[in-house]
Image (tube, rainbow, N blue to C red):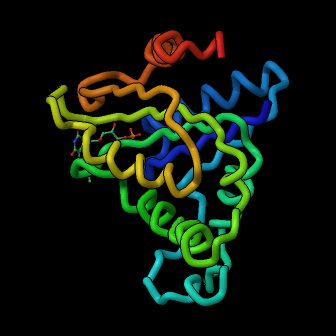
Amino acid sequence: MKITILSASPRNNGFSFESANYIHSYFKKNNIDSILLDIKNLNIHPCDGCGFCHFHKKCKFQDDFALFFDAINSCDLFFCITPVYFSGPPSQFKKLIDRCQIFWELKYTHNTKPFCLNHNPKSIVILYGGASHHDFQFKSTLDIIDIFYKSINTTIDKTFTFPNTDNIELSNEFLEQFAQTINLHSL
Ligand SMILES: Cc1cc2nc3c(=O)[nH]c(=O)nc-3n(C[C@H](O)[C@H](O)[C@H](O)COP(=O)(O)O)c2cc1C
């Protein structure tokens, strides 16, 4: 089994990164192949809607999007861990999502099957929000992740939401409880 973990927060040592790191260390300790992609270390140019991929079956930008492409292509399980910013994903994550336009073009314009369109990895989505829980806190972010997943042919297996992070201490106890909540040890 191969695991890809995306930490989609631009913040150093916040909830997304620390929980991604916890999951990554757990799999490494158990000799399970796992890669941690940290959005703040990825150099991803935003899509400018130029239409290049519509005509050329590839993107004109050559950057760290290729790392995501390879990691998602080869994994069986994808952890997507993101905070909510103004009800949506942080802009650093949205840049990556918008670059997935290449997959729509490959599928619907060029009728070709890129990588994971044959592959369909499962995914666990983990969302953090600083505000105390309210009904629509995670809705828009999940709507965006849903269409992002359609582009990469991934299905959401489980979603876990953690509100109120701005009032919670990010401690070892939190991370141990987090691991229990997502059932990490029985994956
Ligand atoms: C620009 C910005 C916008 C935010 N917008 C929201 C929001 O709409 N809803 C919410 O619950 N929390 C919001 N927060 C709080 C973050 O979701 C929270 O601090 C979260 O823990 C950050 O994730 P991280 O710890 O992984 O960096 C916002 C934080 C920032 C910096």
Which residue is depicted at the point 73% across and 25% down? Answer: 27
Residue 129 percent across, percent down from the top left = 28, 35
Quadrant containing the C terminus in the rendered view? top right
Count of labels shown?
Answer: 0
Quadrant containing the N terminus in the rendered view? top right
Vertical placement of 109 versus 113: above or below?
below
Which residue is depicted at the point 51% across and 70% down? Answer: 101
Q: Quadrant of residue 136?
A: top left
| Left or right for 139, reference 178 | left
Picture quarter with ligand 1: top left
Q: Nearer the viewer, residue 104 or 100?
A: 104
Q: Nearer the viewer, residue 102 or 31?
A: 102
Vertical placement of 50 versus 163: above or below?
below
Q: Quadrant of residue 52?
A: bottom right
Q: Nearer the viewer, residue 32 or 99?
A: 99
| Left or right for 116, reference 83 | right
Residue 148 percent across, percent down from the top left = 46, 54
Residue 21 percent across, percent down from the top left = 61, 33
Residue 146 percent across, percent down from the top left = 41, 47
Which residue is depicted at the point 45% across and 19% down? Answer: 171
